[in-house]
Amino acid sequence: MATKLLGKEKENKDKQKKAAVKKPSKSIGQFFRDVYAELKKVTWPTFKNLVIYTGAVIVFVVIMIIITYAFDTGLEALRDLVVGV
């Protein structure tokens, strides 16, 4: 009896999984129409925001370069002390 119930539960889960999977689009044209529709929903940044965000990324990258360089130089100096070069 318990085995039958477990089997039915498994079948129900399998049916739910199959129902949740979307069917692929019928054609390539439909795909591009869907892409275009999604791109129309995007909120694009203004030029001012784009400049601000780009500047923030550049500053962050420069800071990470400085930190990486400092760690690399420090570890190199530590290695030279330990090895005695």
Image (spheres, grey):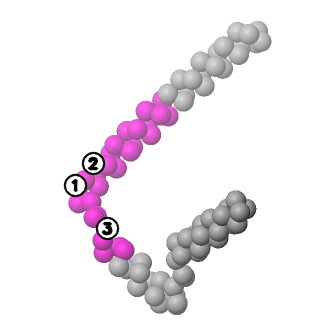
Q: Is residue 78 above or below residue 29?
A: above
Q: Quadrant of the C terminus?
A: top right
39 vs 73, left or right, is left
Label 2 sits on what residue type?
A: Ile
Query: In this image, 37 relative to 30: left or right?
Result: left
Residue that numbered label 1 is attached to: 48
The answer to whether 57 is drawn above or below residue 85 in the figure is below
Quadrant showing the N terminus: bottom right
Q: Are marks 3 and 1 in contact (CB under 8 Å)?
A: no
Residue pictured at 71% horizontal, 16% vertical = 79
Residue 65 drawn in magenta: yes
Rendered location of residue 27, percent (x, y): 52, 90
Magenta stretch: helix, strand or loop mostly: helix
Which amino acid type is shown beneath numbered disc 3? Val
The residue at which mark 3 appears reads as 42
Q: Start and end of the magenta stretch?
A: 38-66
- Callout 1–callout 2 Cβ contact below 8 Å: yes
Asked which secondary structure carries label 3, the reply is loop
